[in-house]
Amino acid sequence: MALMITDDCINCDVCEPECPNEAIYMGAEIYEIDPSRCTECVGHFDEPQCVQVCPVSCIPLNPQYLESQETLWQKYQRLQKAGQPLSPAADASGSAASPPASGT
């Protein structure tokens, strides 16, 4: 699933720079998450970084975008091919790490 930012957002500016996929942007009133770019940090980190830093816990899963771990991994790979910088999970040869074990 992609994540979403609720109306509880206080525009503290801490989530946007943490997103490795540049999925978070300033919307009309609060920050928003582009579901086509959100991988819940799959391929980059074990946990979504925006959720980790949010001081008001306003970043839940978006029920409109149900995605399995495999789908999130495929999205990560697509974003990497589209020109995103390699994640810390990439090895020295430049190939991405193995996909996470599918459990969802």
Image: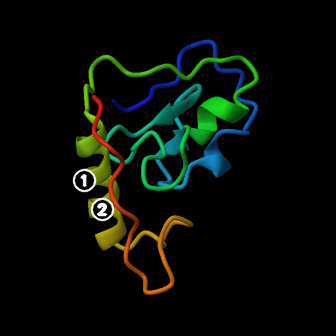
Q: Residues within 10 Å of mark 1 (few under 14, many from 20)?
A: some
The reply to whether the C-beta atoms of the residues labelled 1 and 2 are less than 8 Å apart is yes
Quadrant placement of the C terminus: top left
Residue 11: give x, y in percent of width and height. 70, 29
Q: Is residue 71 found left or right of 79 in the rendered image?
A: left
Q: Name the residue beneath numbered marker 2.
A: 77
> Where residue 74 is drawn, which disc sits there?
1
Quadrant placement of the N terminus: top left
Q: Pick whichever, 23 or 89, lies toward us.
A: 89
Element at label 1? helix
What is the count of numbered marks? Answer: 2
In the image, residue 77 sits, relative to residue 52, either above or below, namely below
**Could you tell me which residue is drawn at 61 percent across and 30 percent down?**
51
Q: Pick whichever, 1 or 83, lies toward us.
A: 1
**Could you tell me which residue is drawn at 32 percent across and 44 percent down?**
101
Mark 1–mark 2 distance (CA, rounded to whole Å) = 5 Å
Q: Pick whichever, 102 or 13, lies toward us.
A: 102
In the image, residue 9 sits, relative to residue 100, either above or below, namely above
Residue 21: give x, y in percent of width and height. 47, 54
Q: Is residue 61 found left or right of 7 in the rendered image?
A: left
**Could you tell me which residue is drawn at 47 percent across and 71 percent down?**
90
Q: Amino acid at mark 2?
A: Gln
Element at label 2? helix
In the image, residue 92 sits, relative to residue 34, either above or below, namely below
Q: Amino acid at mark 1?
A: Gln
Q: Is residue 55 found left or right of 65 in the rendered image?
A: right
